[in-house]
Amino acid sequence: MEPIVIPILVAAIVVVFLVASTVRIVPQARRYNIERFGRYRRTLQPGLNFVVPVADRVNTKLDVREQVYSSDPKPVITEDNLVVNIDTVLYYQITDPRAAAYEVADYLQAIDQLTVTTLRNVIGSMDLEETLTSREEINARLRTVLDDATGKWGIRVNRVEIKAIDPPHTIKEAMEKQMRAERDKRAAILHAEGERQAKILTAEGTKQKDILEAQGTQQAMILRADGEAKAVERVFQAVHRNNADPKILAYKYLETLPHLAKSDNNTFWVIPGELTEAVRAVTHAFGDQSTMGLPASARPEEATTTDADDASDEGGAPALEAHSSLSLDAASAADEVAKQAAAVVSDAKAEAEAARTPQVPGRGQTSGG
């Protein structure tokens, strides 16, 4: 029994191995290249697959998802003979597993070297300033060249991006100084523009203020002049309506004289020549008013006749007393007006002298001692 069991076990093990070698399970997004006796046979798709045991074998297992490859910094010389280090990022996808396995030995190294040579050709025709500002153009040209070259390798380059462009340290310092100068220039320009706008707005505001103040002053002067004109017109109409004679006007003139000396800025005061005429007019006015205030029997003409008759009887003494009383009233009024005018004039002169004479603090004490 034992010699028979051993071959059976060996046969079972061989059968299990052959069955296991026949079945191939491929994961999703994977591709397996199958070779039969060393020659490419087919590419297994995701799922359950069967192969010939011993004759078929899996050569390469490829991932057909989009992948990212970041290369190391590569030195590139620009048109103005500056060496810059450029890092690139490559996004690619395997579209033909058979070509990717059999058309190129190492597709990643091939893509990397092709990227470096293309970059040197592209950057070599640009200066540093253009290189730093033309990334989109460089990316487009790189993608076009790589897509054409990798198409026969079964690889599609979806995108190429320049990750970094590092110029030399001295160039960085010069660029920083240039950038700082540009920013200082912009700041100075903006500051000057701000000051210019501020001055313009201030001038406009001052102009509008002066215009409005002038217009307000003009309107005020017009209204004031209109008010004074109406006041003068009313006074004039009132004077003419009441038929004022020169005697009243002379009296009002004398009333106005004291106001001429009230100003603090007067250093001297001129007495008008019309003062004597005004005093004379007021004197006559008071004389006529005293005459008009007497009864009819006491008026001058009648008094003269009556006094004459009485004088013939009593010697003329009563007529003399009436005439003398009227003359005394007019004379006293004139004297009073003259005294008031003289007092006003003297007060004005005294104030003017006090304003012109500086006060010395020690003089009064010396004279008093």
Image (cartoon, rainbow, N blue to C red):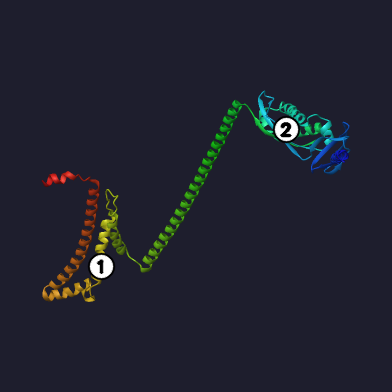
Judging depth in this view, the residue of 277 and 272 nearest the camera is: 272
Quadrant of res 71: top right
Task: Name the front one of labels 1 and 2.
Answer: 2
Label for residue 242? none
Q: Disc 2 marks which residue?
A: 138
Q: Quadrant of the N terminus?
A: top right
In the displayed structure, 98 sits above or below 296; it is: above
Judging depth in this view, the residue of 284 and 88 nearest the camera is: 88
**Residue furthest front in the image:** 1
In the displayed structure, 133 sits above or below 46; it is: above
Q: Looking at the image, can residue 153 be seen?
A: no
Q: Is residue 269 left or right of residue 76?
A: left
Secondary structure of residue under mark 2: helix
Q: Residues within 10 Å of mark 1 (few under 14, many from 20)?
A: few
Q: Residue shown at 21%/64% (left/top)?
A: 333
Label for residue 288? 1
Q: Residues within 10 Å of mark 2 (few under 14, many from 20)?
A: some
Q: Position of residue 292 (x, y in %)?
A: 25, 71
Q: Residue shown at 42%/61% (left/top)?
A: 227
Judging depth in this view, the residue of 43 and 69 nearest the camera is: 43
Quadrant of res 255: bottom left
CA separation, marks 1 and 2? 122 Å
Q: Is residue 96 left or right of residue 283?
A: right
Secondary structure of residue under mark 1: helix
> What's the amino acid at mark 1?
Asp
Q: Looking at the image, can residue 346 be seen?
A: yes
Disc with the residue nearer the chain's start (1 vs 2): 2
